[in-house]
Amino acid sequence: MSLAVRVIPCLDVAAGRVVKGVNFKNLRDAGDPVELAARYYEQGADEICFLDVTATIDERETMHEVVRATAEQVFIPLTVGGGVRSTDDVSRLLGSGADKIGVNSAAIARPALLGEIADRFGAQVLVLSLDVRRSEAVASGFIVTTHGGRTDTSLDALDWAREAIERGAGELLVNSIDADGTRSGFDLELIRAMREISHVPVIASGGAGALDHFAPAITAGADAVLAASVFHDADLTVDDIKGSLAAAGMTTR
C-alpha cells in the first residue's frame, strides 16, 4: 500500500453533465463537470476521476472538450474513462489533458488492449476500471459487469484483475455496484479480496456516505478512496475526509 492515502472525487458524466444515481440507476443531474472539478481541486483533491457513463452504451468516444477545459484549470492528475477502445483513443485523451486512462468494457471484449496501452504509454497510464457485483455464479462471489453495470459477464472479478495486472494495468479502480450511491459504506470484503491479489494500487469506490466510512476502506487495503455524491451534494469536502483519515493515524497528501 502506498504511504500517503489519496482522496479522489469522481465525476460520472453523461451528455456533458455530471450525474449520480443509486446502483448505477435513476441518474440525476449533479452539475457542470468543469466547475465541480475546479471546486474539488481547490478543496485539496489529490486526483479527479471522470467517467463517461454512457460512452460505451452509445458507442461513441468520451468527452475531450470537458477534459481539455478541466486541464486548463485543475493541476492534479486526471483519470478519464468511458468509451476507450484503442491506443489511439488513449493518445487523444492524453493530448486533451488526461494523465491516466480507465478501461473496462473494451478490455473485456479484447484483453490484448491492456498490453497495447501499457506498452505504448506505460503501466502508470493504465487503470483497470472494475464494476463489480456480488454473484454466486463465480468462485470469489464477485462478478465483473460491463456497459455501466448493465451487463453481467462470466468473469470472476479477482481472476480478471489478476490477468489485467499481468497484462500491464498499473492501478485497479474497484467499484461496488451493490454499494454505489447507497451511502452505506464501502464494500470492505471486496476491497480486502482485491488487496490480496494485487501488487498495484487499489482505489476503493462505491458506498461512501459518512466520514467514518473512509478509514475502514484504507484499513481493508485500499490505497485511495473515491467518492461522488457526498461531494456533489456538499455533504463532505475533501478536507473533511483528509481530516478524518489523519485522525485515524493515516497519512494524506
Image: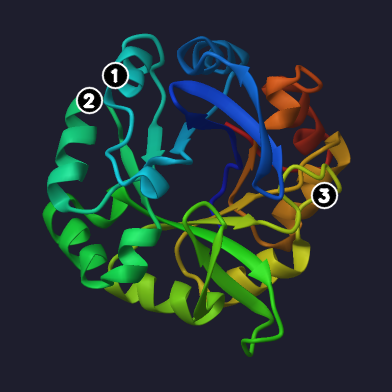
The residues tagged by marks 2 and 3 sit, at their Cα atoms, a distance apart of 34 Å
Residue 48 coordinates in the image, percent (x, y) = 48, 30
- Residue matched to label 2: 96
Foreground of the two, 53 or 3 = 53
Check disc 2 and give the amino acid type.
Ser
Q: Is residue 134 left or right of residue 129?
A: right
Which tag, 3 or 1, sits closer to the chain's start?
1
- Residue matched to label 1: 65
Residue 8 coordinates in the image, percent (x, y) = 57, 34
Q: Mark 2, mark 1: which one is toward the viewer? A: 1
Question: Which residue is found at the position 65% from the left and 33% from the top?
Answer: 20
Which tag, 2 or 3, sits closer to the chain's start?
2
Residue 120 coordinates in the image, percent (x, y) = 12, 54
Q: Do the residues labelled 2 and 1 touch (CB within 8 Å)?
A: yes
Quadrant in which the N terminus is drawn: bottom right
Q: In which quarter of the image is residue 65?
A: top left
Foreground of the two, 74 or 85 = 85
